[in-house]
Image (tube, helix red, strand yellow):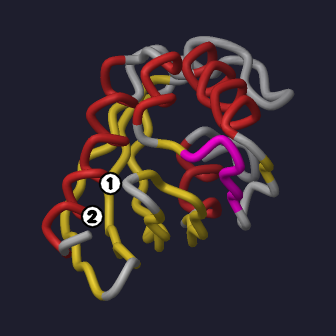
Amino acid sequence: MSLEKNKTIVRSMYEIFNKHNPALLDKIISPDYIDHTLQLRGLEQWKKTLTLLLKGFPDIHPTIEDIIAERNMVWVHAKVTGTHTGECLGFAPTGKKMTFRYSSICRVVDGKIAARETVYDLLDLYNQLSYLFDY
């Protein structure tokens, strides 16, 4: 696949995420998908995780800020915004808005995302939601 096609596939994941419809992930995520950071195995686990995130942050919206492709790898630097209005990962809703950034590396195989590894700035996120410190 060309570098531009690989970037288009990864961009599609963000478009699907922003439509808040996990069922659409079938089109671009490999059935044997691996998320090394979140320790997810398989497309169904990724769908369940997205569903949990949407319950906690119904207006969650990731935006790609930079994207680079090389071989079958696509690097993304993204910004996420949202409001914590529902329980998520054991945390009660805070009603607070959040913005954080992360960088991901996606491996594209046969036109689908097969693997992903991400570095999140969770300390910044937790501070915004007052999980660690109540300012």
**Residue 24 circle label:** none
Asked whether the residues under the numbered discs 1 and 2 touch, taking CB atoms below 8 Å apart as contact, a structural biologist would say yes
Q: Is residue 25 inside the magenta stretch?
A: no
Residue 118, position in %: x, y?
Answer: 57, 68
Secondary structure mainly formed by the magenta segment: strand
Residue 90 left/right relative to 110: right
Question: Whole-Å distance between the Cαs marked 1 and 2?
Answer: 6 Å
Helix, strand or loop status at disc 2: helix
For the N terminus, the image quarter is bottom left
**Residue 10 circle label:** 1
Residue, disc 2: 6
Above or below, comparing residue 49 to residue 14 in the picture:
above
**Residue placed at 64% from the left, 12% from the top?**
86
Q: Which residues are magenta?
A: 30-35
Camera-nearest residue between 89 and 31: 31
**Residue placed at 23% from the left, 55% from the top?**
64
Q: Quadrant of residue 24?
A: top left
**Residue placed at 62% from the left, 13% from the top?**
55
Above or below, comparing residue 36 to residue 33 in the picture:
below
Residue 57 left/right relative to 88: left
Residue 69, position in %: x, y?
Answer: 25, 79
